[in-house]
Amino acid sequence: MDYKHLLATQLGSQLEGVDEATIMELIEYPPNPQMGDLSMPCFKFSKLLRRAPQAIAEELAASWKEHPAVQRVEAVAGYFNVFLQPGHLASSVIGEILEQQDRYGSQNIGQGRNIVIDFSSPNIAKTFHIGHLRSTMIGNAIYKIHEFLGYHCVGINHLGDWGTQFGKLIVAYKLWGEQATVEAEGIGELQRLYIKFHDEAEQNPELENEARLCFVRLEQGDEEAIKLWKWFVEISLKEFEKMYELLGVKFDAYTGESFYNDKMAAFVEELKAKNLLEEDEGAQLVRLDDYNMPPALMIKKDGGTLYHTRDVTAAVYRQATYDFEKCIYVTDAGQSLHFQQWFKVIELMGYDWHNRLVHVPFGKVSLEGAKLSTRKGNVIRLEELLTQAIEKTSEIIEQKNPDLDNKAAIAQEVGVGAIIFSDLSNNRIKDIVFSWEEALNFEGETGPYVQYTHARASSVLRKAGERVIGEELPLKLENHAADLLVNASEQALLKQLYVFKERLEQSAQKLEPSVVSRYLVDLAQSFNRFYHDSPILIEDAALRQARLALVRCTQITIRNGLTLIGLKAPEKM
Ligand code: ARG
């Protein structure tokens, strides 16, 4: 039962001139149950209705039509508070979760409409670093949450597989590289060559020129250049795919920057035809002075294209191909200007869908004072980070639960989960200082804590199965059983389970996976209070049954939430 909606409908009919949607937005869940299960502040209507908030609240209370879901209502200090019928809440929430299982929380808001999500998008021949991890995990969560809400998502990996850097890399490889070393060491060796190029170019600026020419040859389809480039792409992709496998992330299309090579010319013609292109010292650009932005460079002096050119062309292509409701770009906040610039170019071209382009920026990650910079190569390599996380988790499991089956697999699920969760646990725009202690703390507001709570719930259910041989786990809850779940910790947990759907909606609306990760921490805490206050495996069969149902519902909801943000939910750990 959608209690918020129930309340909004009734209040909407009682409050003249106020629509349901406004009321829906105002309704709160008071943190203190003494102030009701749902509450509506009446301050906003004071002016419209020309009455004091408390007077409005009192009128609402006086004219409230009774409903079986509602125990009582009250007017306090300008708030209209609603107390739900405890048994109603229990049977409705538990009934819904047990029925929907792994679909609990899902909706059909999207009605199959397309959402394109451009995420992860690492650069070929460069390390997959912790900044790309954020893009990967934020994008993945946005993808999964939208799918769960009925959208059709298209995940695109816009690989950085084109640009001047490939001119540099080819030059460096031909000067100092060796096939066998590149084959053996992969991106590490390519990265080394790239850094060497920059070091050498400081002494010898002619190298830069050579690299530029080399990239122009590549753009013109020179056979040798293309062959080397393809090889670099292949080697890099192999490593990236290993990461994606470990992280459990998939894409619908690997259409990197190079995919747009044969599509840019037409687009540049269109810019010209629309009188948007201006020549400046041999280069071609779109002026954005009127919008207080530097110009968007489209064609370089030497005829080469740029990051901008490929992004605008890609957007036009995606719009034509997917007719998207939204096209989302997940990158670090450092690229905000880039996106503002070319979103404006799309607008100036007269495309009305420009406002469906959305940049989803996120803050930087640092680790023990290290800074991220690809050029110098002192980046936090994701592979290293994940390997360490798995090792450290193994050590913890060795101490806490040495007899655990499948230790290696679980260490991986928890270790990787810890890293992902720490990435998603704050508002994405915030910078993160990564700390091992924090991320792997089984008691803190962490992935392992949430996973551990899920494992605890699973273990209770297993034990119940052992104790009551032959008795099915409570997949159905009799009506009277719901009436037994009335203590404070049970009711608090039920309310927490109830708001899951709404949290998912908020998360999608704000494109903010942390809404879900924080919800999961709250849910886990709520479950652990219940677990502490309300013994489950007791003699009283009816109450045991009811509490077990609540445990099952928590297990299902935590698992659904974890899955949506890209974590596994092991049953033992
Ligand atoms: N390759 C870029 C980077 O590593 C990210 C690309 C983001 N997507 C886009 N369409 N610009 O910074």
Image (cartoon, rainbow, N blue to C red):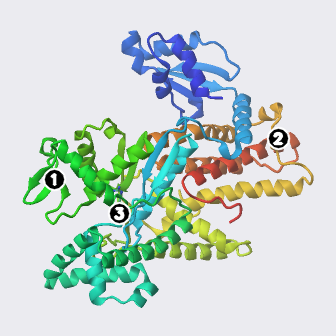
- Camera-side residue: 428 or 192? 192
Q: Which mark is residue 543?
A: 2
Q: Position of residue 95 (x, y in %)?
A: 74, 36
Mark closer to the observer (1, 2) = 1
Question: Distance between the Cα atoms at labels 1 and 2?
Answer: 72 Å
Q: Which mark is residue 285?
A: 1
Tag 1, which secondary structure? strand
Which of pointers 3 and 2 lies earlier in the amino acid sequence? 3
Q: Residue at x 34, y 47 (%)?
A: 316
Question: Distance between the Cα atoms at labels 3 and 2?
Answer: 63 Å
Q: Which residue is mark 3?
A: 258
When asked about the image quadrant of residue 405, the answer is: bottom right
Q: Quadrant of the N terminus?
A: top right
In-image side of 26 versus 481 (left or right): left
Q: Residues within 10 Å of mark 2 (few under 14, many from 20)?
A: some
- Camera-side residue: 330 or 492? 330
In-image side of 287 versus 310 (left or right): left
Tell me which amino acid carries mark 2: Leu
Residue 318, visible in the rendered structure: yes
Q: Quadrant of the C terminus?
A: bottom right
Q: Quadrant of ligand 1?
A: bottom left
Question: Distance between the Cα atoms at labels 1 and 3?
Answer: 20 Å
Tag 3, which secondary structure? helix
Residue 440, visible in the rendered structure: no
Which of pointers 1 and 3 lies earlier in the amino acid sequence? 3
Tell me which amino acid carries mark 3: Ser
Which of pointers 1 and 2 lies earlier in the amino acid sequence? 1
- Camera-side residue: 547 or 319? 319
Q: Residues within 10 Å of mark 3 (few under 14, many from 20)?
A: some
Mark closer to the observer (3, 2) = 3
Q: Which mark is residue 251?
A: none
Q: Position of residue 190 (x, y in %)?
A: 36, 80
